[in-house]
Amino acid sequence: MTANESEPIEMPAEKTDDESAERDDETLELAAQVELLEEENRRLRTEYARAKQSKYRRTAYGLLALGGVTMLFGALVADGREVLFALGGTGLFGGVLTLYLTPTRFVAAAVTERVSTALSTNYRALAEELGLAEQVVYLPSERRSAQLYLPQSPDYDLPELDDGPVVTAAGSRGLLLEATGALLFEEFEQSASESVTARPGTLATQLAEGVVEQFELADAVDTDRDPGGGRLTFRVSGSALGAVDRLDHPLTSFLAAGCATALDRPVTLDVTEDNRADWLVTLRWETESD
């Protein structure tokens, strides 16, 4: 082959009309499947909200029916009429109240979990960047029910509550943040049938019921108290928002913020996995004898 001659250049084979049509069909099929899945997801969310609303409405109608029947018996029966009227009025009032308070929108637990995970990740990143200790402390506060304090040193002095979010005072350097569970505990206090107590044993029961019954953050919470004082332990099963060992997880934050507020003293938090339940949440504080 001479210098002036060159090898022929092979051109890539053009796609045939059949291959292009086949790929277009595959793309359309995938798009159709995605659209069907999105529609099914919307349908399931709608059905879930409708089912929850139906549950509230059935309860309300049951209370109304029970109240009406009891009032009718009270009108017909002379003996115990006052008691029957009182019970009937309570049932009617409860039914109307349940209908009025039935929520119109429900947020899936997966959405809340992703939001809380992002928040915990950001807190952890800040703590690592500032070289803070791994201690987690919840402080009672006048501004909120409790604040989250992440000290720089394991041997720390309590910060002034107005020094946050970045505390630079010697001996108490760290982060002072709004606790995720502070607003939850305030809502719990407002809706509780009885006032929150400062007795640790009873307080543990109240907080556990708040986690399971009111906020539905877990399937079950068992409590244990140190007879000598200064410690409460919660065994958590079936967390609705994933792993509870994340920094300022809503469930643990609610327990710690509630304990710090009710006892009016700093509370340290420790979370580990447990063989008797999913998680072991331990709260500690200094007692008068310490």
Image (cartoon, grey):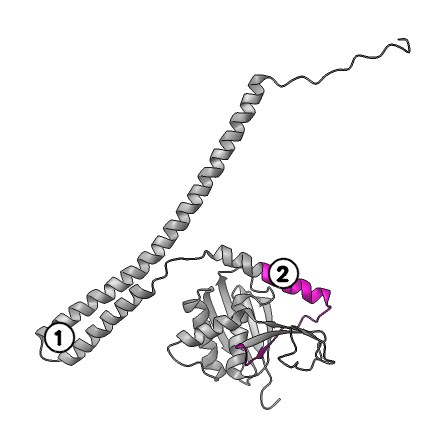
Up/down of 196 relative to 245, above or below: below
Q: Position of residue 101 (x, y in %)?
A: 34, 65
Residue shown at the point (52%, 83%) measured from the top left: 263
Q: Is residue 175 left or right of residue 186?
A: right
Location of residue 90 (image quadrant): bottom left
Work out how far the residue at label 2 is from the one at label 1, CA to CA, in angstroms. Answer: 60 Å
Q: Amino acid at mark 1?
A: Gly
Q: Position of residue 10 (x, y in %)?
A: 75, 15
User: Which SS class for mark 1?
Assistant: helix
* Mark 2 residue type: Thr
Residue to which mark 2 is pinned: 121
Region of the chain picked out in magenta, as a range: 118-145
Was residue 134 drawn as part of the magenta stretch in this picture?
yes
- Residue 166 percent across, percent down from the top left: 68, 73
Q: Residue, x 51% and y 26% (percent of image)?
A: 25
Location of residue 141 with respect to 134 vertically, above or below: below
Whether residue 233 is visible, yes or no, is no
Q: Which residue is mark 1?
A: 74
Q: How many marks?
A: 2
Residue extending furthest right?
3
SS under mark 2: helix
Residue extending furthest toward the bottom: 289
Q: Where, quadrant-wise, is the C terminus in this rendering? A: bottom right
